[in-house]
Image (cartoon, rainbow, N blue to C red):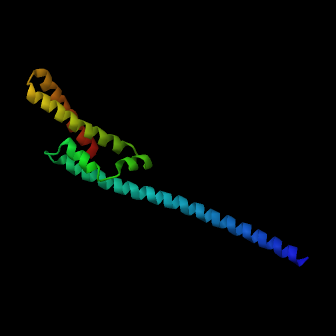
Amino acid sequence: MLLPHLLQNALIGFVLGAAATLLFWILDRIRAGRQRQDELWESCKVAMKDLEILMRNPETRAGDIRVARTHYPIDLWRTILKEREGFLLLERAEGTYSSVEHFGNQFSADASSEKRTRCLLAQSEWASARVAFAN
């Protein structure tokens, strides 16, 4: 009679202990996930600041930004982090560098008014993209 009672108490103790452990484990995983997100976000902000500083340099070209971008796992961060606006602004700024170079080369080869207009529009978009990325 005593043995079934002890077995029942042991089973109840095991189930309650396992449930409490599982609860604390789940809460710890949630906290660790948030902490990883925060650390990734901080790393991403540092990388974006480095790229912003590079973009301030007047001699910076599209290739320089592509090379600097390879030093950071930006595509990985894009898949993990929920904030997308910074990545979109970076892509826009990268694209405007290529546009300015392309239309600048076309204007250098043929100084027509149409090419000049395209070059000026590309430079205007480039300036606004840099400001948007910096903010």
User: Residue 97 at what x, y percent from top left?
Assistant: 21, 38
Residue 41 lies, with reference to residue 106, above or below; the image says: below
Task: Pick the residue in front: 5 or 69.
Answer: 69
Residue 26 lies, with reference to residue 80, above or below; the image says: below
Residue at the image point whose x is 37% and y is 47% from the top: 75
Which corner quadrant of the image does residue 96 belong to? top left
Task: Pick the residue in front: 26 or 74.
Answer: 74
Residue at the image point whose x is 78% and y is 73% from the top: 10
Number of numbered discs:
0
Residue placed farthest to the right in the image? 1
Left or right of 104? Residue 71 is right
Which corner quadrant of the image does residue 115 belong to? top left
User: Residue 9 at what x, y percent from top left?
Assistant: 80, 73
Which corner quadrant of the image does residue 90 belong to? top left
Q: Is residue 121 visible?
A: yes
Task: Pick the residue in front: 102 or 9.
Answer: 102
On the rendered image, what quadrant is the C terminus found in?
top left
Q: Is residue 123 visible?
A: no
On the rendered image, what quadrant is the N terminus found in?
bottom right
Left or right of 20? Residue 65 is left
Left or right of 87? Residue 121 is left
Residue at the image point whose x is 64% and y is 67% from the top: 21
User: Residue 50 at what x, y percent from top left?
Assistant: 25, 53
